[in-house]
Image (cartoon, grey):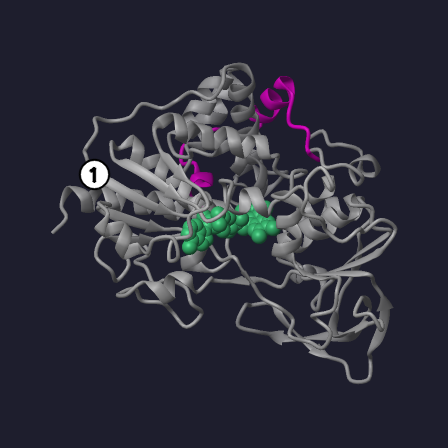
Amino acid sequence: MPEQDPLERSRNFFEVNLGFTEELAKTEALRCIQCPKPVCVEGCPVNIKIKDFIALIADGKFAEAASKIKEDNILPAICGRVCPQEEQCEAMCVVGKKNEPVAIGRLERFAADYERIHFGIKIPEIKKKTGKKVAVVGSGPAGLSCAGDLIKMGHDVTVFEALHDLGGVLIYGIPEFRLPKEIVKAEVEVLKKLGVEFQTNFIVGLTDTIDELMQNGYDSVFIAVGAGLPYFLNIEGENLIGVYSSNEFLTRVNLMKAYRFPEFDTPVFDCTNKNVAVFGGGNTAMDAVRTSKRLGAKNAYIIYRRSEIEMPARKEEVHHAKEEGIEFIMLSNPVKFIGDENGWLKGVVLQRMELGEPDASGRRRPLPVKGSEYTIDIDMAVVAVGNGSNPIIQKTTSGLNFNKRGNIEADENTMATSKKGVFAGGDIVTGGATVILAMGAGRKAAAAINEYLNNPA
Ligand code: FAD
């Protein structure tokens, strides 16, 4: 896919990937061999009819291809950009056994963009109104996909969102250069046109509890509050000025537009010509470090305690980060942040690691090398070592079962919880996962909620 030049893009927030042209899309679609049994679909958590939509693209029927995708996925322009297809549908692609797999994700993105740009997103039909009301808590991909399916089934749906903007991680976490906000807004707009109501600045558990929502006339509730509570390193100096959690850093930049301070009044540390270290090896770490480069960092480091092979980030993001000049410091673990006399961060002590036997995650365990500590100078640090669940729902809702990590326990087929009429899905059930898994959970929950509303006993 055509891309912005790495040097140029590392100084702007415009999208890195530029998308297929019509000609490239057709050529790519013709690589699909239209398998009688398309195993790629088994790799897709929402079972998009991949073979069919690709055949439509090959035929030049681009808008029809978008409609075909939307039979199973209400957010195709988003998924086409951020889903880890290389581990899902494309990993199963038969063409991929000997050659590059068919670029399913890029074709999905092409079809969705084509429809939006040329015709505006087509609004699906909805069934006759049932008179039943569902509350969806959280407007991330799980909440949005559940709301989209339920409204089409004829139920009234209200989405309650704690923040002032809609989309969850899609809007406050994933940066503009990977997923432009206008794409998220356009796909949310479809739900509004379908009749989904949205209430922002509404923290369920504080503004109203789940029980209060049910007393106020909601027949069922879907909890999709994600895993937005950042983990920290718990090392000395972590409270120095200049140390951020990835949530805070990315939220300030993405949602609050800190890079346009003072036009937008929530600033972020001025990275211009500074050294920035981001700790972690996932997509969040890549997003944070590439953001710091765009904010002007002279040296932007990824510091990870295992080796590159064990990094959970998408390969494409790692590749893009390297092209943009991000430096990768592998097999190193922070042991202490160092500050100056005024409490500002000025360095970090790292300890070298070596890899031992695989641990519970299946990845080789990092083991500290004694006496190997060394120090590097940094002005800003971002901690991107994972997220847990926010305890608000747990503290304010009776009758819901949680596991020891604070995730809601839900049936994996129906997403039903231990509380009657209450369903849950997405990161709040699985812990931090992917957009498409969250959407898959939202869809399963919608089907089960529909069933429950029709047969509430
Ligand atoms: P979220 O997207 O977290 O949405 C939950 C929503 O609920 C939020 O809007 C939150 O404000 C709201 N909320 C929370 N508590 C309450 C409350 N009490 N009341 C009302 N609202 C509440 N996945 C990929 O597939 N590809 C990627 O490239 C990728 N990159 C990522 C980059 C970053 C920086 C991060 C953080 C994650 C990334 N992920 C990626 C993971 C993916 O974004 C998540 O798995 C997915 O967003 C989870 O969806 P969700 O709907 O469960 O929760």
Which residue lies under the disc numbered 1? 132
Based on the displayed image, in which of its 4 quarters is residue 235 positioned? bottom right
Q: Is residue 101 visible?
A: yes
Horizontal and vertical percent position of residue 422: 27, 54
Tell me if residue 319 comes above or below residue 402 in the rendering.
above
Q: Image check: 250 left or right of 192?
A: right
Residue stretch rendered in magenta on the structure: 15-43
Q: Residue at x 69, y 70 (%)?
A: 239
Q: Is residue 35 magenta?
A: yes
Residue 166 lies in the magenta-colored region: no
Visible residue check, residue 426:
no
Q: Position of residue 208 (x, y in %)?
A: 34, 53
Q: Which residue: 67% across, 55% down? A: 285
Amino acid marked by disc 1? Lys
User: Residue at the spot x=42%, y=33% of the render?
Assistant: 74
Q: What percent of the width, then of the height, locates residue 270?
A: 80, 51
Q: Nearer the viewer, residue 194 or 344?
A: 344
| Quadrant occupied by the N terminus | top right
Residue 378 percent coordinates (x, y):
83, 63
**Total marks drawn?**
1
For numbered disc 1, what is the local secondary structure? Answer: loop
- In this rendering, position of residue 438 left or right of residue 444: right
Q: Residues within 10 Å of mark 1 (few under 14, many from 20)?
A: some
List the single residue furthest toward the bottom: 370
